[in-house]
Image (cartoon, rainbow, N blue to C red):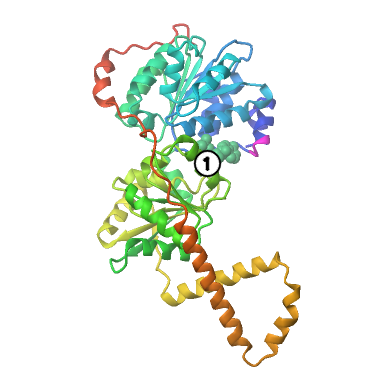
Amino acid sequence: MSFEDHELDPQIVAGLRDMGYEDLLDVQVACLEPLRQGKDVSVRSKTGSGKTAAFGIPLLERLDTEIDGPTVLVLAPTRELAAQIGHELEAIGKYREIKVVSAYGGAPINAQIKALGQGAHVVVGTPGRLLDLVRRKKLHLDRIHAAVLDEADEMLSMGFFEDVTSLLDGCIKCEQVVILSASLNEDTQHLVDRYTTDVETIDLSVDKLSVDEVDHVYYKIGDELPKHHYLLHVMAAEKPASAIVFVNTRSDARLVTTQLAREGYNAEMISGQLPQTERERVMAAIRDGKLKVLVATDLAARGIDISNLSHVINFSLPEDPAIYLHRTGRTGRVGRRGTAISLVSGSRVRTLGLLEREFEIKFAQREFPTTDEMVQMRNDDLLAELVKEAENAIYDGFLAQASAVLARPDARQLVAYLLKRRANQVHDEQRSKANRPKPPRDTGRKGGRRDGFKGSNKGRRRGASKKKGSGRR
Ligand code: AMP
């Protein structure tokens, strides 16, 4: 169904068209009417399914721009996600001239205070920073009509329970609450129970979504070679246009990044402890296609939205099967098919069976290329690269000499020799490049907060009162 069929506000449609959207996605259709009617909604949907616009379209359609001060509040677990949501809402609300301010830690608070001072209809941010702004009396929650908790499960697992509830409790006129979460565990359910009334639950089975759009593949590895060699073989065989390689430990992240770089892959690692500016640079590089391979642990990859990756590679399978879905959800987003590849040792093949049963995934096994095939592929790549380079080079002065070489009886040997020299040269260049930049050092702050959600909120659960406006609906 087109935008017109849903009778969307024409100014919102104009914003959506500018963004290149032509239709509503499933989650957007499902959320539209309940949110338009002002209902509380709990959505089970993964990142990458279009959930920002799912709440963004109806909430921005209904937003009254005449009201002075923010009326919509969006909470997200990480600064990257908050920034992305901010950009998307701004684009959706462009023609309604809706002012969106994003506020998250790791960026200067003064600029955020200034932006809030200039007026905001919507405020998007991470709980800690938003609370800080409230306490400094720079952000006023008393006109908030609608509050959105995005990736609520992640927010809670990062220890933001106290901050989230403080913020929601401060929204004394809030009439509508939207809670989005990939999983509905006991903790998220508690938030739903506490802050929603007559909630409409939309369950767009997360698991199905990622499973259907992704080809799940595994390569069985032995212990004859160091593990990173197997990864290099997979890279050679699959030739991913862009990939995220998931590892279980930071030391593996370093090792894998170094080995990939040494083989000439444009690879960088992202760590949860990288300074914000560095994270943003790496993220922008992979999004713009300047960086081909991102190496990350699950913690480091939290909340990052890279929707155009062709491959997700599990250097190691995660311990928790649910994490397999989180990881592989980074490919195959919104109509693009992706490939998820896992390196699996004999003892972990069992885990695949578990995943197949639990999430109805069908794994296909692929074989590593033989040594001869690897050599052939490398030669093909070398030649393709040479042809590409030649297209843009000027070498007319050598054409006569080339004819002379080709007229010789040993022409084949000479060309072979030139190709060998070229291969050595490429190899040397890769080595020296890989030895130059070290994988980024871990500096700065620790990742998410883990300040005892489990212990601290239990006492509040029972007695917690709904703080929502009495005159709702
Ligand atoms: P989200 O789940 O909000 O992170 O969205 C995932 C991706 O889908 C983002 O890159 C959006 O720009 C894109 N997207 C969202 N809605 C639509 C739509 N209606 N048509 C095409 N792409 C969309």
Can residue 50 be seen here?
A: no
Q: Residue furthest bottom?
A: 409
Looking at the image, residue 206 lies above or below residue 109: below
Marker count (numbered):
1
Range of residues picked out in magenta = 18-22
Give 339 or 422, whichever is nearer the viewer: 422
Kind of residue indicated by mark 1: Arg
Drawn side of residue 164 relative to residue 408, left or right: left
What's the residue at 70%, 89% (across, down)?
A: 407
The residue pinned by badge 1 equals: 281
Q: Is 133 placed above or below 378 here?
A: above
Image vertical order of residue 71 relative to residue 382, above or below: above
Please state the quadrant of the image where ligand 1 appears: top right
Q: Residue furthest top?
A: 471
Residue 55 percent coordinates (x, y): 53, 27
| Mark 1 neighbour density, 10 Å: few (under 14) some (14–19) many (20 or more) | few
* 281 part of magenta stretch: no
Q: Nearer the viewer, residue 354 or 128?
A: 128
Q: Nearer the viewer, residue 90 or 383?
A: 383
